Structures are given as structure tokens and as C-alpha cells.
Image (cartoon, rainbow, N blue to C red):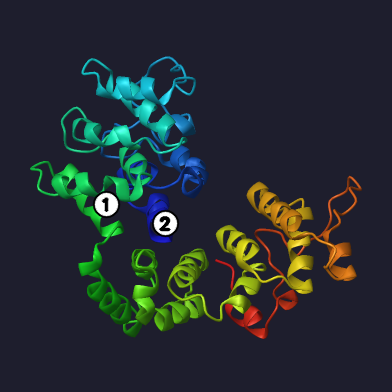
């Protein structure tokens, strides 16, 4: 991920890369590149064709200068699907419909429409299509098997990507070997994808547990820790209590959310979750999850110190220094000495 972000800042074909990134990645991973795009725009060789990310950045795309488009958020799923199915719908309107669908519950009725949702020259999928299909998870697998043999490269590649994310039982030995090879080669980019695929096999992938634990401990990429820990949770959660507790101090939001959900009920855990709930610099999702966990575990049998920790902190109206700041985690306050050694910010 960081390699592509760096290329957008410095690479010669940065505009095309940024369009692909905006198509495939969540907006939170690329929308902070707006200043870079506005500074670099004008010298690129390729013609800009996609609305994203340019419209979000306030950059006009030649040939696409149109008045602001009405939002489709007020339409129902059925109405959005009708727009996508109609031959007379403008391509940009279809993009807007796909964008709206990605913010809702997955719509299985989208699957038969996928082959018709390429660009005008049918060389690429419309923006947001792959994201919408991926949200369907295993429900898209039967259709993906058909797409892999399509003569259109973009549709065949989409089918291959979906099948790779939802492997069948015959893929397990190969994935186990792949993870082992990645560890022996100390490959730090890619094993998180393998881990997600192995997690779908649950306990049948138990042979992967030692390598997944090693990757969770040693990966230099903080954003991958949650993927390894989630995979271990699905495959072999034995002995993960300390890992869940340590995740409450992790610099990555997804790891903290996993820690809140899975950490065992102990006074130390309760106190830390209360800190996350009350931290004004914490994310909304983490604070809400922490509050829900404390509410669910409250009871008369809790020690008095834990009940005191669960009380919301008084609102003084002033910012409070906090070890829970998403961009600065106090390593010395964590549950183990390994926190200070291995939990580096990235």
C-alpha cells in the first residue's frame, strides 16, 4: 500500500495509479492524497477518464465538466439496480449507482448485471464495481467461476480475484505451502492476503497457526496485525488472550476493535477499554465499541475497582492528554515488555 502511495507522489504515471487506487481501495486509504494530486495535475501524459478521485479533489476532468450531479442516495436498491440494468443509463450515472450500493447491505441482484458494467470501450470495469462485488463475498463465487473464462480481460480478472479470495477445499494445501514459503523468504508484503484466505478454512487450517503467530509478532506493517490475529481467531484461538489484551494498546484501529471484542474480562482490560471509551481523540467506532463492551459486561459481580473504571470520565470541556491517541501510543503503558519492542508506529 505504501509503495503505491509513494508512487502517486513521485511516479511518472501517477494519475493512472491513483485512479486504480480510488477504484479498489477504501476512500480512507487515499483521500489524503488530494494535495499531492492538486499539486501534480497538469503534467501527466495519460488522459484522465474516471470521476474518482478527481471529483472528490475538486479537479475537473477534461470532457467530463458537468454540473454537480444529483445524489442517488435517496433511491432504493431496486431503483439503483434498474439504473444499472438499463442500456440507456449514462456511464457516470451507473458509477454513481455503484457508489451508492457500496454504502448499503450487499445486493445479490447485482451479480447477473456485472458482465454489462464495463467502461464504454469494455476494457475496464466501471469504478466501484469490484468493491460492490467483493462485498457479496461467497455469494459471488458461482458467477466468478463463469467470469474467469470470459474473453474480456477485466471480467476474467475480476472472476479470478473473487475466487482467490474465496478458495475451495482443494486450495488449502497450496495456501499452507504458500504461507510457509512467504515466512521462510521473510516476505512482508502479501502474507496478510494469504492469512485472510486461510481464515476461511477455520480449524482445518490449523497447520498455519505457528506461522500466523510469527507474522503477528514480527511484521513491520502495523496495519496487517489485525489480519493475522483475525486469522488466528478463526483457525486456532488457543492462547490468544494476551494478544487480544495487547491489541487494546495497538496503534491500528482494527486491532483495537478486535481487542475490545475479544480481550478476556480482567480489571486491566476493563480499565483500558474505559480509557478508549472516554478518549476524545479516539475514533468514533472504537469509542462506540468500547462503550458497548462495557455496557454488556457490567454486573454486580465485577470488582469494585473495575466498576469505578467503567464510569464515564467527567467532561471538563478541556482536551486531556491520552495514551489512546490514534497516532501516538504509549508503549510503556502496555501489557508486556514486547509492546515496547515490537509495536512500532508506521
Q: Secondary structure at mark 2?
A: helix
The answer to whether residue 34 is left or right of residue 252 is left
The answer to whether residue 283 is left or right of residue 203 is right
Q: Which quadrant does the C terminus fall into?
A: bottom right
Q: CA separation, marks 2 and 1? A: 27 Å
Residue position for label 2: 6
Q: Position of residue 164 (x, y in %)?
A: 26, 59
Mark 1 Cα-neighbour bin, 10 Å: few <14, some 14–19, many ≥20:
many
- Residue at image point 26% right, 39% down: 45
Comparing 189 with 79, the one in front is 79
Q: Find residue 180 and name its label.
A: none
Q: Position of residue 171 (x, y in %)?
A: 23, 68
Q: Which quadrant does the N terminus fall into?
A: bottom left
Question: Where is residue 122, by image quadrant?
Answer: top left
- Residue at image point 52% right, 45% down: 32
Q: Find residue 162 and name its label.
A: 1
Q: Earlier in the sequence, mark 2 or mark 1?
A: 2
Comparing 200 with 189, the one in front is 200
Amino acid at each position: 500500500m505504501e509503495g503505491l502511495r509513494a508512487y502517486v507522489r513521485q511516479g511518472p504515471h501517477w494519475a493512472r495509479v491513483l485512479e486504480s487506487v480510488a477504484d479498489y481501495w477504501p476512500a480512507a486509504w487515499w483521500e489524503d492524497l488530494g494535495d499531492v494530486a492538486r499539486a501534480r495535475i497538469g503534467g501527466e501524459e495519460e488522459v484522465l477518464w474516471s470521476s474518482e478521485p478527481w471529483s472528490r479533489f475538486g479537479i475537473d476532468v477534461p470532457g467530463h465538466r458537468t454540473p454537480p450531479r444529483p445524489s442517488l442516495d435517496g433511491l432504493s436498491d431496486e431503483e439503483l439496480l434498474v439504473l444499472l440494468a438499463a442500456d440507456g443509463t449514462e456511464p457516470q450515472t451507473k458509477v454513481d449507482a455503484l457508489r451508492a450500493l457500496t454504502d448499503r447491505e450487499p445486493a445479490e441482484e447485482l451479480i447477473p448485471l456485472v458482465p454489462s458494467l464495463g467502461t464504454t470501450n469494455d476494457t475496464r470495469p466501471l469504478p466501484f464495481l469490484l468493491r460492490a462485488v467483493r462485498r457479496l463475498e461467497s455469494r459471488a463465487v458461482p458467477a466468478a467461476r463463469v467470469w474467469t473464462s470470459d474473453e474480456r480481460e477485466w471480467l476474467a480478472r475480476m472472476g479470478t480475484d473473487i475466487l482467490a479470495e474465496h478458495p475451495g477445499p482443494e486450495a488449502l494445501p497450496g495456501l499452507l505451502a504458500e504461507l510457509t514459503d512467504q515466512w521462510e523468504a521473510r516476505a512482508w508484503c502479501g502474507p496478510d492476503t494469504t492469512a485472510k484466505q486461510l481464515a476461511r478454512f477455520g480449524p482445518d487450517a490449523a497447520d498455519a497457526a505457528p506461522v500466523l503467530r510469527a507474522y503477528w509478532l514480527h511484521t513491520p506493517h502495523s496495519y496487517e496485525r489485525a489480519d493475522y490475529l483475525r486469522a488466528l481467531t478463526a483457525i486456532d484461538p488457543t492462547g490468544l488472550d494476551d494478544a487480544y489484551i495487547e491489541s487494546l494498546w495497538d496503534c491500528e484501529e482494527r486491532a483495537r476493535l478486535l481487542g475490545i471484542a475479544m480481550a478476556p474480562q480482567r480489571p486491566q482490560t476493563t480499565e483500558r477499554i474505559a480509557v478508549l471509551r472516554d478518549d476524545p481523540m479516539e475514533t468514533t467506532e472504537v469509542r462506540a465499541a468500547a462503550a458497548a463492551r462495557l455496557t454488556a459486561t457490567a454486573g454486580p459481580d465485577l470488582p469494585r475497582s473495575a466498576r469505578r473504571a467503567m464510569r464515564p470520565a467527567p467532561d471538563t470541556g478541556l482536551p486531556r492528554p491520552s495514551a489512546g491517541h490514534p497516532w501516538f501510543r504509549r508503549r510503556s503503558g502496555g501489557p508486556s515488555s514486547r509492546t515496547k519492542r515490537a509495536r512500532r508506529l508506521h
